[in-house]
Structures are given as C-alpha cells and as structure tokens.
Amino acid sequence: MKATYLTAALLAVSVLASGAPARADIILSGAAFSGTNSTGTGPIGYGTTTAPNGYTLFMANGAFSSSPDYINTAKATSDLGFALTAGTHVVSGYMDYGGLAYGATSLFFGGSDTAGISVYAAQTNSLSSVPTFAADGNLLRSVTGTNADGAGSLSYDNGTQTVTLTDYILASTTLISSLNVPQVGTGATSGSGPTIGFEMTLSVTNDTTVVPEPMSIALIVPAIGGLLVARRGRRRASTD
C-alpha cells in the first residue's frame, strides 16, 4: 500500500514538473485595417481578412516582399488559423486602398470578434524613416465589418502565452507600390497590386505561472494523504 501511495505521489509531481497543462499556441484568427486621423480614430477606409463591407486585407507570413507568403488567399477568410509559437514572428498585410496619412491594425485571436491587439501609426515613404507607433483604443473597424473600440493594448495573453507587438510600419502607397507586389486573391494573375501595407513584429513568450490540471491535483491529494498515513505508521512502529 505504501509503495502505491509513493508511486502516485511521484507520478503527480512528475506531471507538474513537466509543465502540464500543455501550452496552447496563440492562434491569429483575423485582422482588420482602418485608416485613422492623427489620434488613431477611424475608420477612414478599411479592410478585413473576412472582407465584410470593405476591402480584403491579405495577411502574409514574413516581412514586406514582392512575393508575399500569404496566409489567406481567398477574399473572405473566416479564420486565418495561423499559430504563433513561442519566439518572434514577422507578419505583413496588404490591401487596395490609398491616400491614408494614418492607419491602424487590429489583430484577433482564437476566433474572437474582440480585438486583442490594436496599433496605429503615421504612414512612411521610406523604411529608413519609420514613425513611432502606439496602442489604439479608439473606434476602428472590427473583423466582423462593424465599428468597435480597438484593444487599446499591444499585448494579448491567452492564459498560457503572451504575444506582444514590438514593431509596426505603415507603408504609404509610394512605398508599397515600389515593391511591385502582384494583384492578390484567388486566381488573380493580372492587375494592379496593393496600394497600402503594414509590417509588424510579434514576440510570443510562455507565461511563467502554469495552473495544474485538475487531474494532477486529483493525483497529488490522495498521494500526500497516503504518505502521511504511512509516516504515522512508521512512527507508531518505532514507538512500539
């Protein structure tokens, strides 16, 4: 019996030590872009990855490129399903809308319609002169195509991991056009390319505090109780 309790206790401790529960990767499920004024309030022209009531926003895995690695290639994508594993990720976005002096991007995670990260900045004509950026909690376009407040934060936590936006560049029509990005969309082979784009860096870290699973607790409680009983038994035997 004592050996059984000891085995259970060791098993429970090993489960906790292994970092259980397993960390779930943060899933980037959608994005929305809004033209804004100088204080980050919009939307003045907009696009979303789901494309309701607006232009299509095409997201790519990687920095600005003349041949982007698109995450979504359809004009309406309900869920990007892009896993943000621990580490650093650079993603970019492209859409057909120009003439914006300022713009904001909202990111949506895990299928939520509420923005997890929202950022805005002035556009730039050169990658060597990038304006500062800031969190945006003002009225922006949401992934559902309606207007809603931005996240007002550059970080999002899903309970086991945190993603933080560390860099943001909003490229003007002049700059994005210089990349000669081809027309985007399913089956698109000709036509003008996107006229505005943005690039962002996302840093994903594991949260330091991990709550034990119920099964781990269920193993530990009786195991500790068994060890206490066994310890009392040994004390009695030594006294006798």
Image (tube, helix red, strand yellow):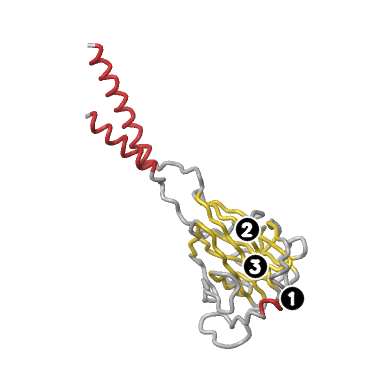
Residue at image point 73% right, 72% down: 100
Residue 34, picture quadrant: bottom right
User: What mark, if any, has residue 37 been given in the picture?
Assistant: none
Residue located beneath label 3 in the image: 33
Q: Amino acid at mark 3?
A: Phe
Residue at image point 38% right, 45% down: 18
Looking at the image, residue 225 sits to the left or right of residue 31; the answer is left
User: Secondary structure under badge 1?
Assistant: loop
Q: CA distance from mark 1 to mark 2?
A: 26 Å
CA neighbours of label 2 inside 10 A, class few (<14), some (14 to 19), many (20+): some
Labelled pair 1, 2 in contact (Cβ < 8 Å): no
The vertical placement of 204 against 62, above or below, is: above
x%, y% of residue 142?
A: 62, 63
CA neighbours of label 3 inside 10 A, class few (<14), some (14 to 19), many (20+): many
Labelled pair 3, 1 in contact (Cβ < 8 Å): no
Residue located beneath label 1 in the image: 99
Q: Nearer the viewer, mark 1 or mark 2?
A: 2
Q: Amino acid at mark 2?
A: Thr
Q: CA distance from mark 3 to mark 2?
A: 18 Å
x%, y% of residue 202?
A: 58, 60
Residue at image point 49% right, 42% down: 209
The vertical placement of 212 against 150, above or below, is: above
Looking at the image, residue 85 sits to the left or right of residue 239; the answer is right
x%, y% of residue 180?
A: 62, 82
The mark that comes first in sequence, 1 or 2, is 1
Looking at the image, residue 168 sits to the left or right of residue 186; the answer is right
Q: Amino acid at mark 1?
A: Gly
Labelled pair 3, 2 in contact (Cβ < 8 Å): no
> Which quadrant, please, contains the N terminus?
top left
Residue 226, picture quadrant: top left
Residue located beneath label 2 in the image: 166
